Image (spheres, rainbow, N blue to C red):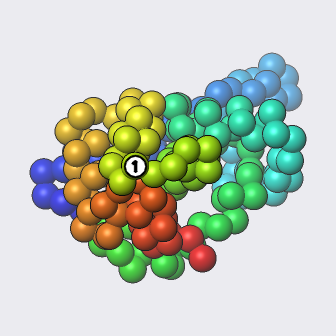
Amino acid sequence: MLEGVDLMSLEEYKGEQIVESELVGDSELVGESELIEGQLEEQPIIKKPKLIKEEVNRRLVHGIKKHNLEYDLLYNAEKAALNKDGDVLTFLFQRMFFYRLNEKLSAYQCDHSYRFTRQILTQMQLSRGKINDILEIFKKNGGVCDCEVLYNVESLVIG
């Protein structure tokens, strides 16, 4: 991670994650973060387009993972660990940044700028300083525009 960069590490991200509560047993509220590790992995992968869209938006804006998506299966922790910026890239993967960038580039052509990248990072409610730090990480890893971020940088955490 870059010196002076105020990005959350994966551990901090998990610790700060606000999770919707669900009603369990005798009206006891239990946060999803308190559930036994692995219960979320045991849930089936959602397939309905409306539910997928809701899940993507929930993760992108709020950082809350409520359901499993097929996209989650693409993540490769060993590959991400090989990159010194792996924590930041993992954070972006989990927050559905690359998924949303792919959606944008499927609908619109890349103008070889960071137009969609900046737009999505802003939707994620990141500060301007954090956005600039992330753009530097992208440049360092061969992502000099929206389409190159998708092709060169996403490949560092999937596969």
Task: Pinpoint residue 15: horizontal percent, then vertical percent.
Answer: 45, 43
Tell me the quarter of the picture where residue 119 sits. top left
Instruction: Reply above or below: 16 against 98.
Output: above
Q: Is residue 32 left or right of residue 95?
A: right
Q: Is residue 33 left or right of residue 27?
A: left
Near-viewer residue (55 or 154) = 154
Instruction: Reply above or below: 53 against 155.
Output: above
Task: Pinpoint residue 72: horizontal percent, then vertical percent.
Answer: 66, 59
- Which secondary structure, mark 1? loop
Please tell me which residue is depicted at 83% across the width and 47% down the height of the picture. 46
Instruction: Reply above or below: 77 against 122.
Output: below
Q: Is residue 42 left or right of residue 104?
A: right
Please tell me which residue is depicted at 75% across the width and 27% down the height of the picture. 22
Tell me the quarter of the picture where residue 136 sits. bottom left
Q: Amino acid at mark 1?
A: Asp
Task: Pinpoint residue 25: horizontal percent, then vertical percent.
Answer: 85, 28
Near-viewer residue (104 or 8) = 104
Q: Which residue is mark 1?
A: 111
How crowded is the residue under tag 1: few (<14 C-alpha within 10 Å), some, or many (20+)? few
* Quadrant into which the N terminus falls: bottom left
Q: Is residue 82 visible?
A: yes
Please tell me which residue is depicted at 18% across the width and 60% down the height of the picture. 2
Please tell me which residue is depicted at 41% across the width and 63% down the height of the picture. 148
Q: Is residue 94 visible?
A: no
Task: Pinpoint residue 7: horizontal percent, then vertical percent.
Answer: 29, 47
Near-viewer residue (76 or 114) = 114
Q: Is residue 150 left or right of residue 145?
A: right
